[in-house]
Image (cartoon, helix red, strand yellow):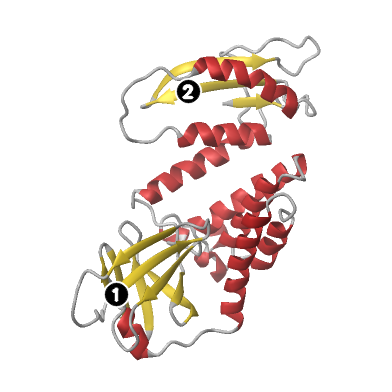
Amino acid sequence: MFAARSENPRVVGSIPTLATILALVALAACGSRKVAPHRPDTAALEREIPGLLRVSDVPGLSMAVVQNGRVVWAEAFGTVIDSAQTPLNPGTVFEAASLSKPVFAYLVLRLADRGEFDLDRPLYEMLEYPRLAHDERYKGITARIVLAALAIEVLQQAIADSPTSAATHLALGRALEAAGDLPAAIASYRRALNADPDEAQRRIQWAEDRVAARARPVAVSQQMLERYAGQYQQQLVAVRNGRLYYKGAVSPESPLTAIAADLFEVDADPAVRIRFVGPESAPAVRLFGIYSDGTIDEWPRSISGSPWIAPAAL
């Protein structure tokens, strides 16, 4: 899907907020699972898109619906940016520009969801980049960091287009958090307080908890860590060298950082926290997965007896 924006007559296909949102929605609907074929609701698209173009100040857009890897519908709306206001058609050639960035990010995240790509593995281990090899810091660059930087760039442009959009400020805050810039993330969340106070306040509190944990590390005794270690259905928790390690059903092993005596952040995914629940002076009996969007998962301990103390990687 490509869109033309009126204030830049040179660029036929740019990445305005409308195009980004529609692209992500369309991509989210195109999973890898085979689904029963059905006709998409193209009548609704044809009815709604012209109005969206008008309110978004986008002169033209070309869009396709993909199901199971095949284009099942394609249409163009509006005009080319030229003096003649030439109508668009499905064959109109667009300049893709930065639209490839969210598409590429989506593909990488799909691979990560399937366990085929590690977002936190240093990129130089997969592809060396001699121009930066002289700087040791480049060995710390991961796909997660690069994707966060990409998202920040796109979202900052979206905010320039719609400076009062609470959703965009919240999304930028999440990207800044992923990049490790917590003060900037909190500032972005604060800009959404008026329009979406509940979500913004939850995000602010989450980020401030992370800041506090780094400023004042929480010490948890070895005895307490051993009470937490074990298997909770498909979730595995090990204690090794005085630290807890967590492995989810589909996620790679990650160290845990204590935010409180019974609450830990998953280092590889700061949007996830783990809380242990159980009787005092006894192994934990339940594990809760707490997410920054407010959702919670729960898993009971599935192995009885002594806690699991792993001497090596899970």
Indicate which disc, 2 or 1, sits on the residue closer to the N terminus: 2
Residue 93 visible in the shown view: no
Specify the label residue 65 is tagged with.
2
Residue 146 lies, in percent from the top left, at 55, 54
Q: Tell me the amino acid under the disc marked 1.
A: Val
State which mark lies toward you, 2 or 1.
1
Q: Is residue 64 above or below residue 31?
A: above
Q: Is residue 157 above or below residue 308?
A: above
Secondary element type, mark 1 = loop
Q: Residue 120, located in which quarter of the rendered image?
A: bottom left
Specify the label residue 233 is tagged with.
none
Secondary element type, mark 2 = strand
Which quarter of the image is occupied by the C terminus? bottom left
Residue 60 lies, in percent from the top left, at 68, 20
What residue is drawn where x is 31% and y is 24%?
A: 36
Residue 262 visible in the shown view: yes
Q: Tell me the amino acid under the disc marked 2.
A: Val
What residue is drawn where x is 42% and y is 69%?
A: 274
Question: Circle 1 is placed at which residue position?
Answer: 285
What residue is drawn where x is 51% and y is 38%?
A: 103
Side of 59 relative to 278 (left or right): right
Q: Residue 187, located in which quarter of the rendered image?
A: bottom right
Q: Residue 227 or 31: which is nearer the viewer?
A: 227
The Cα–Cα distance between marks 2 and 1, rounded to whole angstroms, is 47 Å
Residue 221 lies, in percent from the top left, at 40, 90
Q: Residue 179 or 309: which is nearer the viewer?
A: 309
